[in-house]
Image (cartoon, rainbow, N blue to C red):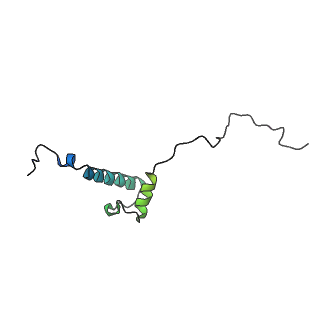
Amino acid sequence: MANYRTTSYFETRPDIVRLFEDLEAYQNWCRFELCDFNPADLYRKDSPLYSAYSYTKRVRRPYQGNKPRYDNTRKPNYENRFSR
């Protein structure tokens, strides 16, 4: 028999801790997005709310610098705009 006074149940079960943290994060997302929160939708791929939540938590690629940004400090060249 395990001695429950010396070890915490949640210290030995990190999967349970992760489940409750994911559930709390999903509840906060539903609260901020004003959606109906249903705990049964957690980890369900066919649920539209959970798929929208998981889409916001996806890993994004950092900016690679391959797209030129608009430079508004450059003065426009109006000489070549009209034909003479």
Residue 28 screen position, x and y as percent: 36, 52
- Residue at coordinates 60% horizontally, 40% vertically from top-left? 65
What predominant SS class does the magenta segment belong to?
A: loop
- Report the span colored magenta: 71-84
Eyeballing the image, is 49 above or below 18? below
Eyeballing the image, is 4 above or below 52? above
Residue 73 screen position, x and y as percent: 68, 33
Snapshot quadrant of residue 7: top left
The answer to whether residue 5 is left or right of residue 69 is left
- Residue at coordinates 46% horizontally, 55% vertically from top-left? 55
- Residue at coordinates 10% horizontally, 45% vertically from top-left? 5
The answer to whether residue 45 is left or right of residue 70 is left
Snapshot quadrant of residue 11: top left
Looking at the image, the residue that sits furthest to the bottom is: 46
Residue 59 screen position, x and y as percent: 46, 49
Eyeballing the image, is 16 above or below 70? below
Residue 82 shown in magenta: yes
Looking at the image, the residue that sits furthest to the right is: 84
- Residue at coordinates 86% horizontally, 43% vertically from top-left? 82
